Every structure is written in structure tokens, then in C-alpha cells.
Amino acid sequence: MQLDITDSDSIAALLDLITERYGRLDVLINNAAILYDRWQTIVDADLAQLQQAMDTNLYGALRLTQACLPLLRQAPHARIVNVSSGAGALRSMNGSTPVYSLSKIALNGLTLMLANQLKGDGILVNAVCPGWVATDMGGDGGRPIAEGAKGIVWAASLPADGPSGGFFRDGQAIEW
């Protein structure tokens, strides 16, 4: 089913379908992202583009997560995986790709907040950087999509006593 995470009606339609068919949601993978802005730096960043990226890369993930929480709470071992990026790691901030990087920094913060808030519900929440992947946004030369997806699948399949509130690449913790 098509989903536009910036559109509440689109989210509601998807949730109606999931509720009708399954009654619960075991895993939510927030993978939507836009605007890998290699052409600008923080000193000349287009704020309209930043607002657009935040609406998808951060607010979209939050909007969808909030809407899915009732269904996630119905699952015995729910997982939320926020697909992030090394571009959102504070340790590597240099002012390049400012729109994308700021949105991923915010997504990482959202990951930590959700992990802490949902601890009591048994929902594990983690951020995963798939690395540079050969997608429409990533372009040629990156890892095959299946390679990038392995870490996401790992986080979606964690056991009940698995980590929550972490940032991972290929199943290994990386620095925020």
C-alpha cells in the first residue's frame, strides 16, 4: 500500500488496513528520507529545504510512530527501527549536507526519546545507519540494497533482551 508519511489521511488508511488484517504491528521501520543536499553548506543552507526535509525525515517518522503505537503495543515484542545515517552523527559534523544531516541528528534524538519512553512497553527502539547504499538517493557506487538492509533487519529482529536506544551499523554500535 502506498504511504505518504507527511499526510495524516494516508497514515490513517494504512493503519485501518493493518488493524483489519492483523490487529497489531510487530515492526515499524521508519525509512523515508529526502534531500541529501551535497550542493550546500550550513552557512548557505536553504531553510525552506530544511523545513521540507524535517517534515519527512523527522516529523514523518514521529507522526507515523505516534499513529502506530496502539498497534505496536498489541504486539508481544514490537520493534521500531529508525533508518538514520552517519551524516547524523554529532562526531562527524562539519557543515556539509546541512539539511539532511540536521534532520538525521533530530531523528537520532527522537530514537533516544522513544526508547526511553517505550521501555516499559517492551518496545525496542533503535537507529540504524545502513551505510552508503545504491538507492535513488544514494546513487551509484554504494553498497547493494540487500547489504544495507541487513542491519535494519537485524534491529527489527532483536530478541526481547536486545538493546534499545542505540545507533548501529551492520549490527555494531556506532557513535552518536
Image: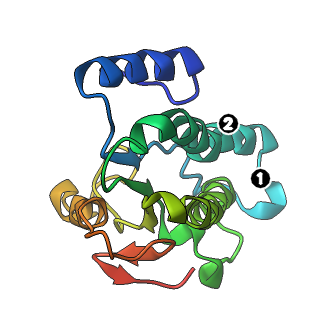
Residue at 72 percent of width and 45 percent of height? 50
Residue 69 in percent (x, y) is at 50, 41
Q: Element type at marker 1?
A: loop
Residue sitting at x 33%, y 75%: 162
* Alpha carbon distance from label 2 to label 1: 12 Å
* In-front residue for pair 160/44: 160
Q: Identify the secondary structure beneath mark 2.
A: helix
Q: Where is residue 20 in the image (x, y as percent from the top left)?
A: 29, 17
Is residue 165 left or right of 26 when viewed as pictured?
A: right
**Quarter where residue 42 is shown:** bottom right
Task: Give the residue at mark 1.
Answer: 45
Nearer to us of marks 2 and 1 is 2
Which sits in the foreground, 91 or 136?
A: 91
Tell me the residue at 34%/65% (across/down).
Answer: 130
Q: What residue type is labelled 1?
A: Ala
Quarter where residue 146 is shown:
bottom left
**Disc 2 crowd, CA 10 A, few/some/many (<14, 14-19, 20+):** some
Quadrant for the N terminus, please.
Answer: top left
Splitting the image into 4 quarters, where does residue 6 fall? top right
Vertical order, 34 against 111 (above or below): above
Which residue is label 2 attached to?
52
Residue in the image at 38% along x and 46% along y: 28
Q: Position of residue 121 (x, y in %)?
A: 48, 57
Q: In this view, does 167 lie to the left or right of 158?
A: right
Give the residue type that dot 2 points to.
Gln
What's the mark number on residue 33? none
